[in-house]
Amino acid sequence: KTRMAGGGEPFQYEQLSLVVGSNYVLSLQQHRGDCLGLVRERLLHKRGVFRSYGADYLAYSILDAVVDGYFPVLEDYGERLEELEEEILERPRQATILKVQSAKRDMLALRRSIWPQREFFGAMVRDPTPLLTDRTRTYLRDTHDHAIRIMDLVDTYRDISSGLTDLYMSSVSNRMNDVMKVLTVIATIFIPLTFVAGIYGMNFNTEVSPLNMPELNWYWAYPAFWVVMIIAAGVLLLFFRRRGWIGSGDSSD
């Protein structure tokens, strides 16, 4: 069975062994703390029908408590997956995808844990045995149904984990596209400005030939240069905005 650690930490495995006889049940565990507290309480306070129904019913109660102990674990994982989805949508980070991969590994381990139990309960329900009465076998059908539901939940959460991996990659790609778009817009604006600045940065002597940059001798040459640069940058920004590449404008493709 599994035992969930606090704070969303990875669960721990614990093996529970049962020896069932005609009038006794012997249980062996590895660690203290489990999901059998309710069964012990009913035994200590002599509540329930354990004495009248026999040892097979007690064994069923233990097994049913073990199977039902998976539901809180899965509920915790469901909440964690929802939190991871919100985290991916808001701000995907490398630590986020590591948490998703950890959840996927845990789901695989849970599946490996519950699969043999589902098969065991199915065999107990189908195949008659002298240690189980028909009445207890009827109760075991309910436990078998719970095991099937747990398998379905595990498979669902595994699919969600895989979907979160794809969502993370898509979110990171979209963020990268946004960054590249901003950088491309900035570079595109400065390319013509750099071109103009590069041309007028050439040191041709205007005294040698009147064709060597006569604008350098203009009285308003420097202010005119800045006016041209600002107009060029403004026209490019307006063009990008109308195309919907920046700001909130719609694309007019």
Image (spheres, rainbow, N blue to C red):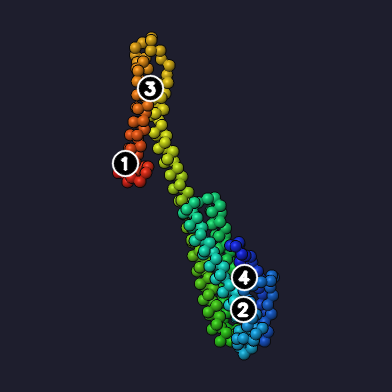
Amino acid found under the numbered disc labelled 1 = Arg
Q: Which x, y percent locates residue 32?
A: 69, 71
Neighbour tally class for label 3: few under 14, some 14-19, many 20 plus, Cα within 10 Å? few
Task: Please identify the quarter of the rendering in which residue 219 is found.
Answer: top left
Q: Which label lies toward us, 4 or 3?
A: 3
Residue assigned mark 1? 242
Q: Which label lies toward us, 1 or 4?
A: 1
Task: Please identify the quarter of the rendering in which residue 25 is found.
Answer: bottom right
* CA distance separating discs 4 and 2: 16 Å
* CA distance separating discs 3 and 2: 88 Å
* CA distance separating discs 1 and 4: 61 Å
Neighbour tally class for label 2: few under 14, some 14-19, many 20 plus, Cα within 10 Å? few
Q: Quadrant of the C terminus?
A: top left
Q: Which label lies toward us, 3 or 2?
A: 3
Residue at left 34%, top 31%?
231
User: Is residue 136 shown to the viewer in this render?
Assistant: yes
User: Is residue 168 shown to the viewer in this render?
Assistant: no
Please report whichever mark, 4 or 2, sits nearer to the chain's N-terminal start: 4
Residue assigned mark 4? 1
The number of discs equals 4
Amino acid found under the numbered disc labelled 4 = Lys
